[in-house]
Image: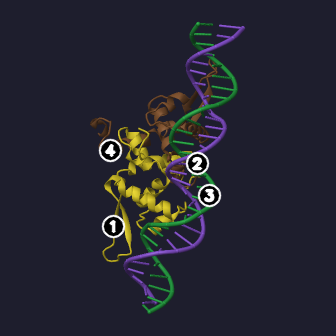
Chain colours: A brown, B yellow, C green, D purple
Amino acid sequence: MSKGKTQDWHGCPTRYAAGILADKWCFLILRDALLHGKRTYSEFLNSPEGVSTNILADRLAKLEATGMLDRQIDPRKASRVCYFPTRKARDILPALLALMVWSTRYDQFTDAPESFAQ
Amino acid sequence: MSKGKTQDWHGCPTRYAAGILADKWCFLILRDALLHGKRTYSEFLNSPEGVSTNILADRLAKLEATGMLDRQIDPRKASRVCYFPTRKARDILPALLALMVWSTRYDQFTDAPESFAQ
DNA sequence: GTAACCACTTGCATATTGCAAGTAAAAATT
DNA sequence: AATTTTTACTTGCAATATGCAAGTGGTTAC
Protein backbone atom coordinates (compact mmCIF):
# COMPACT_ATOMS: atom_id res chain seq x y z
CA MET A 1 0.00 0.00 0.00
CA SER A 2 2.65 2.46 0.95
CA LYS A 3 4.56 1.48 -2.19
CA GLY A 4 4.19 3.31 -5.47
CA LYS A 5 3.46 6.91 -6.30
CA THR A 6 0.93 8.51 -4.06
CA GLN A 7 -0.70 10.03 -7.09
CA ASP A 8 -1.76 6.48 -7.92
CA TRP A 9 -3.44 5.94 -4.58
CA HIS A 10 -6.91 4.51 -5.03
CA GLY A 11 -9.60 2.91 -2.95
CA CYS A 12 -10.26 5.01 0.11
CA PRO A 13 -11.80 8.35 -0.94
CA THR A 14 -9.68 10.37 1.44
CA ARG A 15 -6.55 8.64 0.24
CA TYR A 16 -7.42 9.21 -3.40
CA ALA A 17 -7.97 12.91 -2.80
CA ALA A 18 -4.75 13.06 -0.81
CA GLY A 19 -2.81 11.43 -3.63
CA ILE A 20 -3.85 14.16 -6.06
CA LEU A 21 -4.36 17.23 -3.90
CA ALA A 22 -2.23 16.88 -0.81
CA ASP A 23 0.70 18.73 -2.26
CA LYS A 24 0.90 22.43 -1.67
CA TRP A 25 1.93 23.31 -5.22
CA CYS A 26 -0.79 21.25 -6.88
CA PHE A 27 -3.25 22.83 -4.53
CA LEU A 28 -2.17 26.36 -5.41
CA ILE A 29 -2.00 25.66 -9.13
CA LEU A 30 -5.60 24.47 -8.98
CA ARG A 31 -6.58 27.60 -7.09
CA ASP A 32 -4.97 29.70 -9.80
CA ALA A 33 -6.56 27.73 -12.61
CA LEU A 34 -10.02 27.56 -11.06
CA LEU A 35 -10.32 30.82 -9.20
CA HIS A 36 -7.96 33.21 -10.93
CA GLY A 37 -8.30 32.08 -14.51
CA LYS A 38 -4.61 31.41 -14.95
CA ARG A 39 -3.67 29.27 -17.91
CA THR A 40 -0.02 29.59 -18.89
CA TYR A 41 3.24 28.47 -17.37
CA SER A 42 4.38 32.02 -16.75
CA GLU A 43 1.09 33.00 -15.14
CA PHE A 44 1.37 30.14 -12.68
CA LEU A 45 5.04 30.96 -12.13
CA ASN A 46 4.18 34.51 -11.13
CA SER A 47 1.93 33.54 -8.24
CA PRO A 48 2.97 35.18 -5.00
CA GLU A 49 4.02 31.93 -3.34
CA GLY A 50 6.99 31.69 -5.69
CA VAL A 51 7.13 28.14 -6.98
CA SER A 52 10.41 27.25 -8.67
CA THR A 53 10.46 26.48 -12.35
CA ASN A 54 11.32 22.80 -12.18
CA ILE A 55 8.68 22.10 -9.56
CA LEU A 56 6.07 23.96 -11.55
CA ALA A 57 6.86 21.91 -14.65
CA ASP A 58 6.69 18.73 -12.59
CA ARG A 59 3.34 19.61 -11.01
CA LEU A 60 1.75 20.71 -14.25
CA ALA A 61 2.74 17.35 -15.69
CA LYS A 62 1.30 15.53 -12.68
CA LEU A 63 -1.94 17.45 -12.84
CA GLU A 64 -2.16 16.62 -16.51
CA ALA A 65 -1.43 12.96 -15.74
CA THR A 66 -4.17 12.83 -13.11
CA GLY A 67 -6.67 14.37 -15.51
CA MET A 68 -6.98 17.70 -13.72
CA LEU A 69 -5.49 19.90 -16.43
CA ASP A 70 -5.65 19.72 -20.18
CA ARG A 71 -2.47 20.91 -21.91
CA GLN A 72 -3.00 22.52 -25.26
CA ILE A 73 -0.78 24.43 -27.63
CA ASP A 74 -2.45 27.49 -29.08
CA PRO A 75 -2.87 26.77 -32.81
CA ARG A 76 -2.62 30.49 -33.61
CA LYS A 77 0.58 30.98 -31.66
CA ALA A 78 2.67 27.88 -31.17
CA SER A 79 4.77 29.33 -28.37
CA ARG A 80 1.70 29.65 -26.19
CA VAL A 81 0.82 26.59 -24.09
CA CYS A 82 -2.42 26.67 -22.15
CA TYR A 83 -3.44 24.46 -19.26
CA PHE A 84 -7.21 24.26 -18.95
CA PRO A 85 -8.91 22.85 -15.88
CA THR A 86 -10.91 19.75 -16.77
CA ARG A 87 -14.38 18.86 -15.56
CA LYS A 88 -12.72 16.74 -12.89
CA ALA A 89 -10.84 19.82 -11.69
CA ARG A 90 -13.92 22.03 -11.80
CA ASP A 91 -15.80 19.47 -9.73
CA ILE A 92 -13.34 20.12 -6.91
CA LEU A 93 -14.73 23.64 -6.51
CA PRO A 94 -17.32 22.85 -3.81
CA ALA A 95 -14.63 21.26 -1.65
CA LEU A 96 -12.26 24.13 -2.35
CA LEU A 97 -14.88 26.66 -1.36
CA ALA A 98 -15.61 24.72 1.83
CA LEU A 99 -11.92 24.84 2.65
CA MET A 100 -11.81 28.57 1.98
CA VAL A 101 -14.70 29.14 4.34
CA TRP A 102 -12.86 27.13 6.97
CA SER A 103 -9.65 29.11 6.42
CA THR A 104 -11.51 32.36 6.65
CA ARG A 105 -12.80 31.31 10.02
CA TYR A 106 -9.52 30.09 11.41
CA ASP A 107 -6.81 32.21 9.81
CA GLN A 108 -6.40 35.23 12.04
CA PHE A 109 -4.65 37.07 9.22
CA THR A 110 -7.05 36.10 6.46
CA ASP A 111 -7.37 38.33 3.42
CA ALA A 112 -10.96 37.24 2.92
CA PRO A 113 -13.71 39.64 3.97
CA GLU A 114 -15.69 38.62 7.02
CA SER A 115 -18.78 38.30 4.87
CA PHE A 116 -17.21 35.31 3.14
CA ALA A 117 -17.40 33.19 6.26
CA GLN A 118 -21.20 33.60 6.20
CA MET B 1 6.19 34.99 0.65
CA SER B 2 7.79 31.75 -0.34
CA LYS B 3 10.04 32.02 2.71
CA GLY B 4 9.19 30.40 6.03
CA LYS B 5 7.32 27.23 6.92
CA THR B 6 4.32 26.62 4.78
CA GLN B 7 2.38 25.73 7.90
CA ASP B 8 2.64 29.42 8.73
CA TRP B 9 1.11 30.52 5.47
CA HIS B 10 -1.62 33.05 6.05
CA GLY B 11 -3.70 35.50 4.08
CA CYS B 12 -5.14 33.78 1.07
CA PRO B 13 -7.70 31.16 2.19
CA THR B 14 -6.50 28.56 -0.26
CA ARG B 15 -2.91 29.08 0.80
CA TYR B 16 -3.78 28.84 4.47
CA ALA B 17 -5.59 25.55 3.93
CA ALA B 18 -2.70 24.31 1.81
CA GLY B 19 -0.21 25.15 4.54
CA ILE B 20 -2.04 22.94 7.01
CA LEU B 21 -3.64 20.24 4.90
CA ALA B 22 -1.64 19.87 1.71
CA ASP B 23 0.51 17.10 3.07
CA LYS B 24 -0.60 13.57 2.50
CA TRP B 25 0.20 12.36 6.01
CA CYS B 26 -1.58 15.22 7.77
CA PHE B 27 -4.52 14.60 5.53
CA LEU B 28 -4.68 10.91 6.39
CA ILE B 29 -4.14 11.48 10.10
CA LEU B 30 -7.11 13.84 10.09
CA ARG B 31 -9.17 11.24 8.26
CA ASP B 32 -8.27 8.69 10.93
CA ALA B 33 -8.98 11.08 13.77
CA LEU B 34 -12.23 12.44 12.37
CA LEU B 35 -13.70 9.49 10.53
CA HIS B 36 -12.22 6.41 12.17
CA GLY B 37 -12.03 7.57 15.77
CA LYS B 38 -8.31 6.92 16.06
CA ARG B 39 -6.59 8.57 18.96
CA THR B 40 -3.23 7.02 19.79
CA TYR B 41 0.15 6.95 18.13
CA SER B 42 -0.02 3.22 17.48
CA GLU B 43 -3.51 3.46 16.02
CA PHE B 44 -2.35 6.08 13.53
CA LEU B 45 0.77 4.06 12.84
CA ASN B 46 -1.28 1.01 11.90
CA SER B 47 -3.18 2.73 9.11
CA PRO B 48 -2.88 0.84 5.83
CA GLU B 49 -0.86 3.57 4.11
CA GLY B 50 2.10 2.76 6.35
CA VAL B 51 3.52 6.02 7.61
CA SER B 52 6.95 5.72 9.16
CA THR B 53 7.43 6.39 12.84
CA ASN B 54 9.50 9.56 12.62
CA ILE B 55 7.16 11.14 10.08
CA LEU B 56 4.14 10.28 12.17
CA ALA B 57 5.71 11.93 15.22
CA ASP B 58 6.55 14.98 13.14
CA ARG B 59 3.05 15.30 11.70
CA LEU B 60 1.29 14.80 15.01
CA ALA B 61 3.43 17.61 16.40
CA LYS B 62 2.59 19.82 13.43
CA LEU B 63 -1.11 19.15 13.73
CA GLU B 64 -0.88 19.97 17.41
CA ALA B 65 1.03 23.17 16.58
CA THR B 66 -1.61 24.24 14.08
CA GLY B 67 -4.39 23.63 16.58
CA MET B 68 -5.89 20.63 14.84
CA LEU B 69 -5.12 18.03 17.48
CA ASP B 70 -5.08 18.23 21.24
CA ARG B 71 -2.44 16.00 22.83
CA GLN B 72 -3.35 14.64 26.21
CA ILE B 73 -1.82 12.07 28.52
CA ASP B 74 -4.39 9.78 30.07
CA PRO B 75 -4.37 10.59 33.81
CA ARG B 76 -5.41 7.00 34.63
CA LYS B 77 -2.66 5.45 32.54
CA ALA B 78 0.36 7.62 31.95
CA SER B 79 1.69 5.54 29.09
CA ARG B 80 -1.38 6.32 27.03
CA VAL B 81 -1.21 9.50 24.94
CA CYS B 82 -4.34 10.57 23.12
CA TYR B 83 -4.68 13.02 20.25
CA PHE B 84 -8.14 14.50 20.10
CA PRO B 85 -9.38 16.45 17.10
CA THR B 86 -10.16 20.04 18.05
CA ARG B 87 -13.16 22.06 16.98
CA LYS B 88 -10.97 23.51 14.25
CA ALA B 89 -10.32 19.98 12.98
CA ARG B 90 -13.97 18.96 13.22
CA ASP B 91 -14.93 22.02 11.22
CA ILE B 92 -12.95 20.61 8.31
CA LEU B 93 -15.47 17.79 7.98
CA PRO B 94 -17.75 19.45 5.38
CA ALA B 95 -14.76 20.02 3.12
CA LEU B 96 -13.49 16.50 3.75
CA LEU B 97 -16.86 15.03 2.86
CA ALA B 98 -17.01 17.13 -0.31
CA LEU B 99 -13.61 15.75 -1.27
CA MET B 100 -14.77 12.21 -0.58
CA VAL B 101 -17.76 12.68 -2.82
CA TRP B 102 -15.44 13.94 -5.53
CA SER B 103 -13.09 10.98 -5.09
CA THR B 104 -15.97 8.56 -5.23
CA ARG B 105 -16.96 10.01 -8.56
CA TYR B 106 -13.50 10.04 -10.09
CA ASP B 107 -11.64 7.11 -8.57
CA GLN B 108 -12.39 4.17 -10.79
CA PHE B 109 -11.27 1.81 -8.03
CA THR B 110 -13.06 3.54 -5.18
CA ASP B 111 -14.01 1.53 -2.11
CA ALA B 112 -16.98 3.78 -1.47
CA PRO B 113 -20.42 2.48 -2.40
CA GLU B 114 -22.05 4.13 -5.38
CA SER B 115 -24.74 5.50 -3.11
CA PHE B 116 -22.19 7.76 -1.47
CA ALA B 117 -21.76 9.82 -4.59
CA GLN B 118 -25.45 10.74 -4.39
C1' DG C 1 11.52 -8.20 39.12
C1' DT C 2 11.33 -8.99 34.62
C1' DA C 3 9.11 -8.90 30.26
C1' DA C 4 6.20 -6.49 27.20
C1' DC C 5 4.16 -2.26 25.58
C1' DC C 6 3.90 2.36 24.10
C1' DA C 7 5.40 6.62 22.35
C1' DC C 8 8.60 8.20 20.56
C1' DT C 9 14.09 9.32 18.83
C1' DT C 10 18.29 8.50 16.18
C1' DG C 11 21.30 7.40 12.25
C1' DC C 12 21.78 6.95 7.74
C1' DA C 13 20.72 6.10 2.76
C1' DT C 14 17.70 7.82 -0.73
C1' DA C 15 14.41 11.01 -2.73
C1' DT C 16 12.56 15.54 -3.26
C1' DT C 17 13.05 20.44 -3.33
C1' DG C 18 14.84 25.03 -4.25
C1' DC C 19 17.83 27.98 -6.65
C1' DA C 20 20.49 29.60 -10.54
C1' DA C 21 21.69 29.07 -14.94
C1' DG C 22 20.98 27.28 -19.44
C1' DT C 23 18.38 25.83 -23.79
C1' DA C 24 15.41 25.62 -27.78
C1' DA C 25 11.66 27.15 -30.44
C1' DA C 26 8.77 30.83 -31.81
C1' DA C 27 7.55 35.77 -32.06
C1' DA C 28 8.50 40.49 -32.14
C1' DT C 29 11.59 44.16 -33.33
C1' DT C 30 14.97 46.53 -36.12
C1' DA D 1 17.12 39.14 -42.74
C1' DA D 2 19.27 39.42 -38.56
C1' DT D 3 18.86 40.19 -33.74
C1' DT D 4 16.47 40.46 -29.60
C1' DT D 5 12.80 39.00 -26.65
C1' DT D 6 9.43 35.92 -25.00
C1' DT D 7 7.86 31.45 -23.57
C1' DA D 8 8.18 27.04 -21.81
C1' DC D 9 10.68 24.52 -20.12
C1' DT D 10 15.55 21.47 -18.58
C1' DT D 11 19.83 20.77 -16.04
C1' DG D 12 23.15 20.69 -12.20
C1' DC D 13 23.85 20.90 -7.66
C1' DA D 14 23.38 21.93 -2.73
C1' DA D 15 20.05 21.74 0.93
C1' DT D 16 16.16 19.61 2.95
C1' DA D 17 12.78 15.99 3.75
C1' DT D 18 11.60 11.20 3.72
C1' DG D 19 11.75 6.18 4.63
C1' DC D 20 13.61 2.41 7.02
C1' DA D 21 15.70 -0.06 10.82
C1' DA D 22 17.18 -0.01 15.15
C1' DG D 23 17.31 1.97 19.67
C1' DT D 24 15.58 4.40 24.07
C1' DG D 25 13.08 5.36 28.16
C1' DG D 26 9.13 5.47 30.87
C1' DT D 27 4.92 2.63 32.04
C1' DT D 28 2.28 -1.39 32.88
C1' DA D 29 1.36 -6.36 32.99
C1' DC D 30 2.64 -10.73 34.72
N-terminal of the pair, mark 4 or mark 3, is 3
Whether discs 4 and 3 lie on one chain: the answer is yes
- What residue do we see at 30% from left, 74% from top? B75
Q: Which residue is mark 3?
A: A3
Label 3, label 2: how far apart the Cα atoms are: 11 Å
Kind of residue at badge 4: Asp
Label 4, label 2: how far apart the Cα atoms are: 29 Å
- What residue do we see at 45% from left, 59% from top? B58
Neighbour tally class for label 4: few under 14, some 14-19, many 20 plus, Cα within 10 Å = some
Give coordinates of residue B96: x percent, y percent. Answer: 43, 50
Residues marked 1 and 4 touching at CB (< 8 Å): no
Q: Which residue is mark 2?
A: A7
N-terminal of the pair, mark 4 or mark 2, is 2
- The reply, left or right, for residue A106 in relation to residue B60 is left
Q: Which residue is mark 4?
A: A107
- Please, which chain is the residue tagged with disc 3 on? A
Kind of residue at badge 1: Gln
- The reply, left or right, for residue A31 in relation to residue A101 is right
Label 1, label 3: how far apart the Cα atoms are: 32 Å
- Please, which chain is the residue tagged with disc 2 on? A
- What residue do we see at 39% from left, 56% from top? B63
> Which element is circle 4 on?
loop
Instruction: Name the one closer to the observer, B33 or B20.
Output: B20
Q: Which residue is mark 1?
A: B72
- When the figure is inspected, residue A46 is found, relative to residue B22, above or below; the finding is above
Kind of residue at badge 2: Gln
Q: Is residue B35 visible?
A: no
Residues marked 2 and 1 touching at CB (< 8 Å): no
